[in-house]
Image (spheres, rainbow, N blue to C red):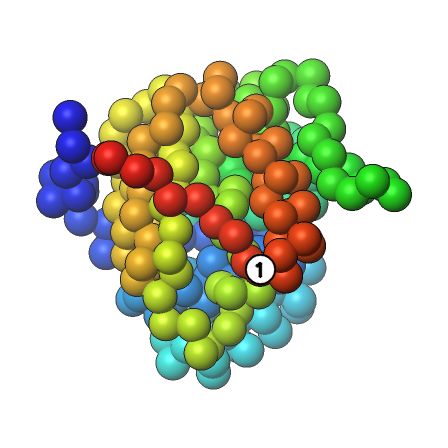
Amino acid sequence: MALDLASLPDVSGLTVGILGGTGDQGRGLAYRLALAGQQVLIGSRSAERAQAAAQELTELSGASVGGGENADVAARSDVLIVAVPYAGHADTLAGLADALVGKIVVDCVNPLGFDKQGPYALKVAEGSAAQQAEALLPGARVTAAFHHVSAELLADPSVTSMDLDILVLGDDRDAVAVVQALAGRIPGMRGVHAGRLRNAGQVEALTANLIAMNKRYKAHSGIRVTDV
């Protein structure tokens, strides 16, 4: 079955919160979604940092971006993108379990380590960061996506189109479709349903290979899926 982008839901009216939105990946995704016309909120442990980042993104994008503490952003958003460092992943989400009941959560965290030989995937007891999120957020609709996006390209205003596919994983098909549609709002991106959440581990781990390729070829590699 070919990918039918026309059948995806209209997500233009949804508010997207970025937990960890002051980091490079979170800020980059916030910038691109704001440019696309999405209502975006930046979340952080510090409301001041979040509001400062939101003001910078408002000036850069020309859109109105809001900011606040993670719990406040979680309560005010329809969809939450988790872009926190893996070291703080579990603690951040455990404290937001009640606020995220019924919300679509998009985990884009890559559990990686680095040594003299380069990047490598860390073992996660639950199988992946996304499955860890699922275990910590039993009332949320957890998906996984946006793992293979260059933060540098996202933040570069001279880049007008992102040439890559976004692999979206999840057990809730309606939630997956929403995330696919959000990805598709960013020029050049396409959201592709890539399986159930139990398969998120290898998607997260593939980021180590992409980082290694980027270093080797001085590039910003991403993923394109053929014949879909």
Q: How far from the left and from the top, in percent, is residue 44?
A: 63, 55
- Where's the N terminus, which quadrant? top left
Q: Which residue is drawn at 25% across and 30% down?
A: 174
Q: Residues within 10 Å of mark 1 (few under 14, many from 20)?
A: few
- Residue nearer the viewer, 141 or 119: 119
In this figure, which residue is indicated by the disc labeled 1?
219
For residue 41, above or below residue 137: below
- Where's the C terminus, which quadrant? top left
Visible residue check, residue 219: yes
- Residue nearer the viewer, 75 or 128: 128
Q: How far from the left and from the top, in percent, is residue 9?
A: 18, 42
For residue 141, above or below residue 154: above
Q: Which residue is drawn at 78% across and 43% down?
A: 118
Image-based side of 163 in relation to 73, left or right: left
Q: Quadrant of residue 206?
A: top right
- Residue nearer the viewer, 50 or 170: 170
Local secondary structure at mark 1: loop
Q: How far from the left and from the top, in percent, is residue 190?
A: 30, 47
Q: In which quarter of the image is residue 227?
A: top left
- Residue nearer the viewer, 192 or 29: 192
Image-based side of 140 in relation to 7, left or right: right
Identified by mark 1, the residue type is Ala
Q: How far from the left and from the top, in percent, is residue 172?
A: 32, 23
Q: Residue at x 45, y 67 (%)?
A: 31
